[in-house]
Amino acid sequence: MSDNYPSDVKLNENPNGTVSFATEVVATIAGLAATEVDGVASMISPSSGLADMFSRKSNRNLTKGVRIDLEDNRVSVDVTITVDYGSPIPDVAKNIQENVKKAIETMSGLDVKNVDVHVTGISFEREQRANAELDEQHRKMLEKTVEVEAVPAAEAPEAALGDADEADEVLADETEAVEAQAEAEDGLDEDAEDDAEEDAEAPESEEVAEDAFDAYDSGKDEA
């Protein structure tokens, strides 16, 4: 197969005229159909170096990596690609064959004889991009976490004042309780003193009673 395509393809002749198109149109259709397949990282020419192997599939040369051969309006297509890391190569190749064949036959009316797919490299660009996006998400989550933690920290003085007020109330309550207990103890002490005084006065009352009884006995005897 050759990269030197014929200048145009004569599709048919009819009473109204001739329909033809540039052969490069077929290559362009094939290239676009191939890049639509998930897992295709880029289209490359077989003779390209490493720089082309890792080029993006948005390259403006839409026929890059595509070689076609026309014979009696039957097309043979060669597609050379790199695939994204992690993509199943057999599935990618099969999807390319189906998509290229369908696109060429639908858009040009030509019969596609075969589509040969050549995988010459693996691209890690998508994986690196996914990792970068994941790192960015983690960074944003970390920033949000820091902001959420910073809000309580800013409100800490007010919280501290609230705790101090509560502590003062508790201390006041404890002080009142201690004073009440002290007053109660003082009351008990006063009652104890009163009882002691009464006990101390009791013997004197008994002595008075005894004296009165003795005087009564004496008067009785004299009588």
Image: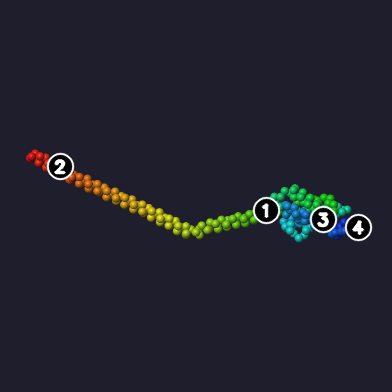
Tag in front: 2 or 4: 2
**Other-residue count near label 1 (Cα within 10 Å), few / some / many at <14 / 14–19 / ≥20:** few
Is 100 on the left-hand or right-hand side of 155? right
Tag in front: 1 or 4: 4
Proximity of marks 2 and 3: CB atoms separated by less than 8 Å: no
The quarter holding residue 220 reads top left
For residue 210, the mark is 2
Residue that extends furthest to the left in the rendered view of this protein: 222
Q: Secondary structure at mark 4?
A: strand
Q: Nearer the viewer, residue 5 or 146?
A: 146
**Other-residue count near label 3 (Cα within 10 Å), few / some / many at <14 / 14–19 / ≥20:** few
Q: Amino acid at mark 2?
A: Glu
Q: Give the residue at mark 4.
A: 14
Q: Nearer the viewer, residue 17 or 118?
A: 17
Q: Give the residue at mark 3.
A: 107
Q: Earlier in the sequence, mark 3 or mark 4?
A: 4
Q: Amino acid at mark 4?
A: Asn
Q: The N terminus lies in which quarter of the figure?
A: bottom right
Compared to residue 23, the image places residue 214 above or below, namely above
The quarter holding residue 5 reads bottom right
Does any portion of residue 53 appear in the rendered image? Answer: no
The residues bearing labels 1 and 2 have C-alpha atoms spaced at a distance of: 119 Å
Q: Earlier in the sequence, mark 2 or mark 4?
A: 4
Q: Residue at x 22, y 48 (%)?
A: 197
Q: Amino acid at mark 1?
A: Glu
The quarter holding residue 42 reads bottom right
Q: Residue at x 40, y 54 (%)?
A: 170
Q: Give the residue at mark 1.
A: 127
